[in-house]
Amino acid sequence: MNYAIGSTDSVQERLFGVVSGVCHLERDSFPDDATWERFEALLADNTKRAARGDEGTIEATTSQMSNEEAAKWLQEALSIFTDVAEAYGRANA
């Protein structure tokens, strides 16, 4: 997540980096169904375009987003993982 906040790369590149880094997560990584459903929506919206050449669906999708759309999804990703961190903190307090 530090990359998403501190990088000078485009918002589309930062979103690609975040989604690529977390796309492997499964349901048991999330504290509740609502957070998992938000994560599934994040993945679905960031993999909806077909890959061309050697790029994957995440890059194909995020590279074609407007700055506003990519920023919206990047904010949602940070919000999801803030919720996960807070739930983890409560569970281990």
Image: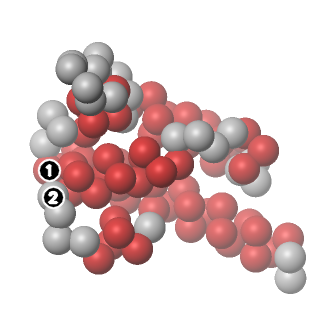
As drawn, the label of residue 10 is: 2
Q: Quadrant of the N terminus?
A: bottom left
User: Looking at the image, which is closer to me, 24 or 75?
Assistant: 24
| Mark 2 or 1, nearer chain start | 2
Secondary structure beneath dot 1 equals helix
Pinpoint residue 88: horizontal percent, then vertical percent: 76, 68
**In this picture, is 78 found above or below 50?**
below
| Viewer-closest of 24 and 44 | 24
Disc 1 target residue: 67
Q: Position of residue 56 (x, y in %)?
A: 33, 28
Determine contact: label 2, label 1, CB under 8 Å. yes
Residue 37 placement, left or right of 32:
left
Answer left or right for 30 relative to 43: right
Q: CA distance from mark 2 to mark 1?
A: 8 Å
Q: Is residue 38 visible?
A: no
Task: Tell me the number on the disc at residue 20.
Answer: none
Between 69 and 19, the residue placed more toward the observer is: 19
Q: Amino acid at mark 2?
A: Ser
Q: In the orientation shown, which residue stands out farthest toward the front?
A: 54
Residue 20 in which image quadrant:
top left
> The C terminus appears in which quarter of the rendering?
bottom right
